[in-house]
Image: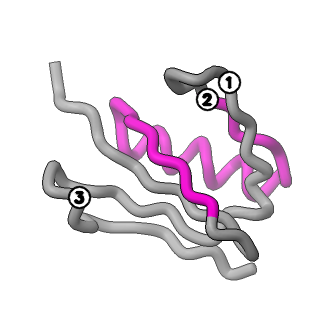
Amino acid sequence: MADKHKVKISLLGVMKEYEIEVDDKKKFMKEIEALMKDGAMYWFKDDKGEIGINTTQINSIEFLDDDGKREAGLVSNS
């Protein structure tokens, strides 16, 4: 089984960031881009519960390596 990819999502206008893990980087990006286009929510669960992110408020998405260094990312045009 492939390793999970660490992802950091930051939001516009706030100092809030979310870190999650995804199995498939390309599938995740296709899902996020479709949700952003539709102005929909991205839902995920962490150890504290379920979280919904308004995708129109995403400022950036970074993929991190095991040391926390940025591998690649997406920055919103908003």
Query: In the image, is 24 to the left or to the right of 43?
Result: left
Q: Which residue is mark 2?
A: 44
Q: Which residues are magenta?
A: 16-44
Answer with the quarter of the image where residue 62 lies.
bottom left
Q: Residues within 10 Å of mark 1 (few under 14, many from 20)?
A: few
Taking the magenta stretch, the answer to whether it contains residue 58 is: no
**Residue kind at label 3, given as amino acid type:** Gly
Marks 1 and 3: in contact by CB < 8 Å?
no
Q: Which residue is mark 1?
A: 50
Residue at 54% over, 47% down: 30
**Residue kind at label 1, given as amino acid type:** Glu
What separation in Å lies between label 3 and label 1 (alpha carbons)?
24 Å
Q: Residue 76 at what x, y percent from top left?
A: 63, 74
Q: Which residue is mark 3?
A: 68
Q: Residues within 10 Å of mark 3 (few under 14, many from 20)?
A: few
Mark 1: which secondary structure?
Answer: strand
Give whichever of discs 2 and 3 has the lower sequence position. 2
